[in-house]
Image: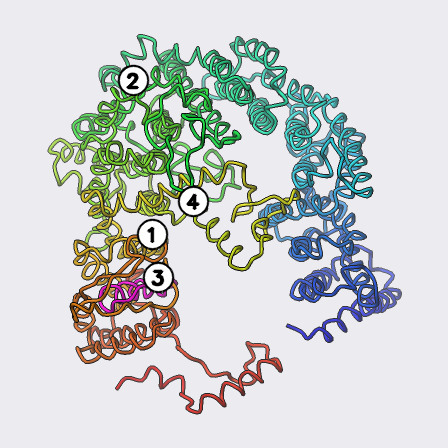
Amino acid sequence: KLDVKVWMQFVTAMPQAVGEANDAASQARAGRTTVSQMDVLVEQLPFHRGLSRMLALLLSAHVSYISTDKDILKGQGPKYQALAAYLNLLAEMLAHPSGRICGEQINLWVTLLRDPQTSKSDMLTPFLERVLVGFMTSMVRIRWEDVEEDRHQFSTLMEASWTDAEEYDSWLCDLRSKCSQLLKFIGNAEPKISVTTIHARVQSLLSMHGTGEPRNHLNRANNQLTQMSEAVLQFEGVTQPLDNILQGLPDWAVRANAAGLDQKRAAINNEVRTKLSEMAQMIVTWNPTDTWLKFRRSNMIEALKHYWDHEPSTLLQGVDSLLGYLSVEEWKAGETNGEQRLTDDVAGLRKRSGIALIAVSKKVPQHLVPWLAQLSERAKTLLSLSSLSAPSRMHLYEFLSCVATAVEDPVARANFVADVLANALEIIESPPVKESVSSVEGLMTMMGIAQVANNPASATDPASVRQVTKTFTTFFSALNQLLSVGKRCNEAARKRPNGGIPVVTTTAGNITNSNFPDEGPISINDLAVNDPFVPLWPRILPILIRVVDVTLRLWHPEYQAVLLKNPIQRFVYAISDDEAYLAMKQDSSTGGVFGEGGTAGTVVSGWDRRDMNLAPKWAGWFNELRNTTFQLLGLLSGQRVLFAPEIAGLFPELVSAIVEPTHLRSMEHRHFTQYLKQFIEILLLACPVTLYQSHLSPILEPVFEHVVLRLQMSWKPVLDSSDSSSLKALTTPECDAAALVAASGGEQWYSSYYARGGQFVGDMQGVGIEAAVEKVRVELSRTFSDVLQSALALKGDWALVLANQAKEEQAVKKNDTSKLGSGPITRVGDSNGGRVNADGTPRGANDAAIEARKTLRINEMCRFILLADERVAYSLASAVVDALEYPDAYTCRRCTKICHRILEACAWDTRYTQLIGSRMFGKAVKAIVTEPKWMVGIEWDMINLIRDVYVRLVLGQTLLPGGQGPAMQQPKDPNNPLAFEQAKNADKPLIGGGMLCIPSDLPREIFAGLPGIGVETVRKLDAEMSQKRSAKDQKDALRELLRTASENLKQAEGSSPDGGIFGRANESEGLLGQNIKRDWVAGDKDRLLTASMVRKQEAAKAEEPTNYDSAGLFKLD
């Protein structure tokens, strides 16, 4: 970092130096008459890129010099003049025809606009219009074929900027991603400039390209514009800036009531609203005829939702246009069977319009309520059309439900939602559906599986395929509509003024005493006051239980033994082409599943889900059915209907269906991962504290006991490394043998089943066979650790509650209430000046009451799953401890955090001593001493865990949450010299927890048994860690002991070939091989040596007379 004077010299001199360099270059070119302007641009491109990068870095690395200089912030004085000339040079460079120049500066402008001092001053105002125009221009996609065929104005320059289309696409994607934040910041800092600029841009585009001119790159089949037509590309380029700028506008600049604003802001408010009104009118009255222009218009209409939140005068016109796009028709013959289907462009337009409808209705439902009756009639007209696709129907239902949630009367709201979903309820309650889900055989018949056994041709018979597809689609669409509407209603309920707290009394409870009447079973009628969907659950739940039961039962070994032998029916258990594609981790830019190099037709050889063949459709159907049912179970829990008295009679039946032992054992890894994430995690967070024993124990006990078995058997082949063939997915040639093993059942079946993650990949070949198994195995362990972190308030919604509490404590401690209104600097600030959460989101009026309930659950959940229920506690702790040796850094790092929480809550309990002191400690020590390569990067996390265990179980010390901070030594018990007094926070794990009063020798024995470590060394360690209790000192002491053991173990092992991820990390990779201390080396070329650093170095040497050579620190005796 440069000294401020030197930095200012650079800033002052650079614009003049660049100008002189340009003059010199111009004079040099004067004599070269054969050189064109394009050749000059290409020749100077590397210089311009480097210059843009260097100029940007010179400012971004010294923003503090700008933000702390009052004259610069006020826009006065010689320093500001110099900086203004410098920024002017940067802004001028943004007009360069190569987008690479813009890309080099984006981080600088984001940094300047994110800084609270520079963004609030007017110093950036003269340059932001050019910045905005420059980046908006670069965001417009270039047709690379024009560059290759020399049709682009700057073809040569573009080819010099990017090597090929793939590199350009990657760069453009990255630029647009970064511009999202930049444009929001500009909109927030300068609303007048940003709105004026985007207004002019939209107006210009509508004038030049609104009718599709120039009509190039047309679709030969219908003479319409395509995605690569010039007009379409131009409108695509303006869509994101429009959305980002409108989203970033401060409330004061857009609100209808300008009262309370000063004269300057009132004038800006008036001009901004005028420009926005004109722009909204231009967009909603634009009526293009080309499908792709309609697509872009739907994007622009969606962006207007941010404006409509303040001024809804054109809202109805926009919504009416989106509704009209849902019924646009253009048909083509199918590729294989001649069946009429919508063209891809029209199908995309319908989907895009439906998504836009939902986005608008979620943002401004209150403004649509007055027209609810008319919108409902319009929707019914659309729903009556036979040509309306299933996704469009779902979008319509979601749209209406979002609007309905804004209705004030709870009864009217619930009645309207029931009316919207009447058809879906009628379908799932119909006799054919009830018969189909009454047994596995009924489900197989509905999906055309049973018929294939006697008539294999039925799988490819067009009439049969159409009938089965229609039957399943009708049933699934009904379930999906219920799920979609239910989720929207639940989201809206949480946003109500009371925060979604059930209204069971006239008060919100006593926050101080944590006395909440709603923390128990709440009737459906009370829940319906907030959520209009919940009265439908008594009709939905019986069918849902049956669907879950028969779907999971179909995966039992006895059914797999039969179906795997049939050459067609076996594909019921196969993964879909989409899952195969994700397992291969291919680049989606090649066209996805159906593009070049895609996986369509690889699982069922030669057939994919678009063909008239049931076999490739079954995998996707079962995925959709299973995902929907698990999400419905999560919704049942999240809406708290699962705990309502009216559902008590169905609860035993539900439990028997969702935790039936064979159901749990028979799920594939991908199924169980969804089960944990979509149901179990939500259940843990939603259950009231008074119902943990009655509603959580019956579910968590069998689930967590099964998790231990599943994880152990899944990772056992990896840890043993004895039979790599067991890690491959099941393929078609192996199905007959697998069917025989399934028929016998028992441990042999489940051992092989879990080793391959339950994966059957059909006719798939190549590396995907192993990649598919690796993917689901890793996702299983990661999902399990994530769910536990959420339940223990280590991440997610509950962790935010603790972060808010810490933030408030800091504000009180420092007597600085301004901290309560500030969030992360990466977010656009809350212009209203209200209190925000630790993540920057605004706080609601009732958040204190909501967080008080969450705090109660956080404390009780920790006690319940780690202490109160022994079956749950033992299974959970065992699974987490076992995961410390699984070769996946993501899982291991998160499990160390969970282990810290276990220590904080349970270290004092002697029931945990063996598990913590022997198994947990032993696995952590082994992971460090053996130095496997997969552990590189997380060694300090593991050493910190070792420290936490050792000080709590051996030394009578406690730590702050997460094993942080200095150790706090507990005094000896006056009545027992061999024991320590318990910490006062032993029953409060969230603030540090307790320790074991009577020390355990288990950790000492493990240390003493390490190579080269004896009892005397352990005693020295105890003395050193008792005397020096800072985190750094204790971890360095542990590291030195573990390094010694590792070196001795390495010598005993001798040289061995590389063992892959289990091979020992070399000295440059592992933590133990790195120097603990490094003396400053004057003249080190990799470091910048400043005067202040030299002074500090000399002072440190004066205080530390003994200087150790770095190699001597690791020298063994």
Question: Dot 3 surroundings within 10 Å: few (below 14), some, or many (20 or more)?
Answer: many
Alpha carbons under labels 1 and 3: distance apart: 18 Å
- Magenta span: 934-958
Q: CA distance from mark 1 to mark 4?
A: 16 Å
- Residue type at mark 4 is Gly
Q: Does 999 sit left or right of 456 as displayed?
A: left
Residue 318, given in percent of the width and then of the height, sits at 67, 22
Sequence order check, earlier mark of 1 and 4? 4
Image position, residue 22 (x, y; %)? 83, 65
The residue lying at 52 percent from left, 55 percent from top is: 812
Q: Are marks 1 and 2 in contact (CB under 8 Å)?
A: no
Of 1026 and 594, which appears nearest the observer?
1026
Marks 3 and 4, Cα distance to the nearest angstrom?
Answer: 20 Å
- For the residue carrying disc 1, how many other residues have a C-alpha within 10 Å: few (<14), some (14-19), or many (20+)? many
Q: Observer-nearest residue: 835 or 125? A: 835
Q: For the residues labelled 1 and 3, say whether their Cβ atoms are less than 8 Å apart.
A: no
Residue of label 1: 891
Magenta segment includes 937: yes
